[in-house]
Image (cartoon, rainbow, N blue to C red):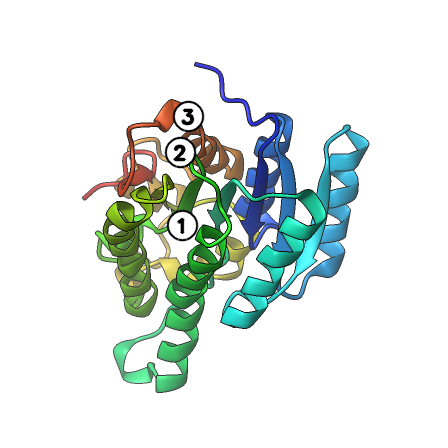
Amino acid sequence: MSTTFDGRVALITGGSRGIGAAIARRLAEAGATVAINYRSNAGAADELVEELRAHGHRAEAFGGDVTDPARIADVVARVVEEFGALHLLASNAGIEHFAPLADITLADFENVFRTNVGGQLFAVQAAAAVMPPGSRIVLTSSVSARIAVHRHTLYAASKAAVSAMALNLAPELAEAGIAINAVAPGGTATDMAAENGADYVHPALAGVEPQQVTRSMNALGRLARPDEIADAVAFLLSQNASYITGSTLDVAGGWMR
């Protein structure tokens, strides 16, 4: 089945790099007008906009921190002012966190949950207020929400909350004709993963080749490419997924439960 977004306006939070940038490219290639939200990396967002425009796509960058409900509401308002509507939201902005239990602070807790949970909740709140019936939303959870990863507690808990959010918002948003789902990526080859890569390995696996570690946990034996996550997001944002709402779709290469 084809996935086309002609005439649809999409907002991608955390869209300047990694999975977010791949989602922006995927939706633009399928005909969507894309609004790329970023928090601090204006240069990367502007480069992506220029890349998309060079290929004939309509795109614009919108700065704004999703952890501030007023700022993300302003981003949504500016998108509607610029493009006339908002039909699709890919809520991708988030942060990683690794730490042993003894080192977790209240500031860590507030930062992770404010970004990964609050940032997505208030993006949905702002978007749903202006979306017409037939609109669709995809949140970003993680396979970490249902597997044990060493010293990954705060991140995993925040992503479990995102899946619960998608499930529980589904009947409420259905009243407005809006569908909401989530994707749960496994390990993905992004800058953020590279920055945190050393912390993915349990001490018991020290010295083991990274590929062997991945193969022991993942049926495909490799990290995902950002475009593979973007394809799943595009499916859930499309009418091909018209009877799917409240669900979390694993995109994890057969990650072991």
Q: Quadrant of the N terminus?
A: top left
Residue 88 picture location, percent across and down: 50, 41
Q: How far is mark 1 from mark 3, CA to CA? A: 19 Å
| Secondary structure at numbered mark 2 | helix
Query: For the point 51% across and 51% down, which residue is it?
Result: 130
Q: Which mark is residue 140?
A: 1
Query: For the point 47% across and 30% down, which residue is it?
Result: 231
Q: Amino acid at mark 3?
A: Gln
**Foreground of the two, 128 or 116:** 128
**Foreground of the two, 100 or 118:** 118
Query: For the point 57% across and 47% down, which residue is it?
Result: 11
| Horizontal relation, residue 59 to residue 105: left or right | right
Residue 253 picture location, percent across and down: 34, 34
Vertical position of residue 132 compared to residue 80: above or below: above
Q: Which residue is mark 2?
A: 236
In this rendering, which labeled residue sits more in front, label 1 or label 3? 3
Q: Amino acid at mark 1?
A: Thr
| Horizontal relation, residue 46 to residue 213: left or right | right
Marks 3,2: beta carbons within 8 A: no
**Foreground of the two, 183 or 59:** 59
Between discs 1 and 3, the one toward the N terminus: 1
Q: Which mark is residue 239?
A: 3
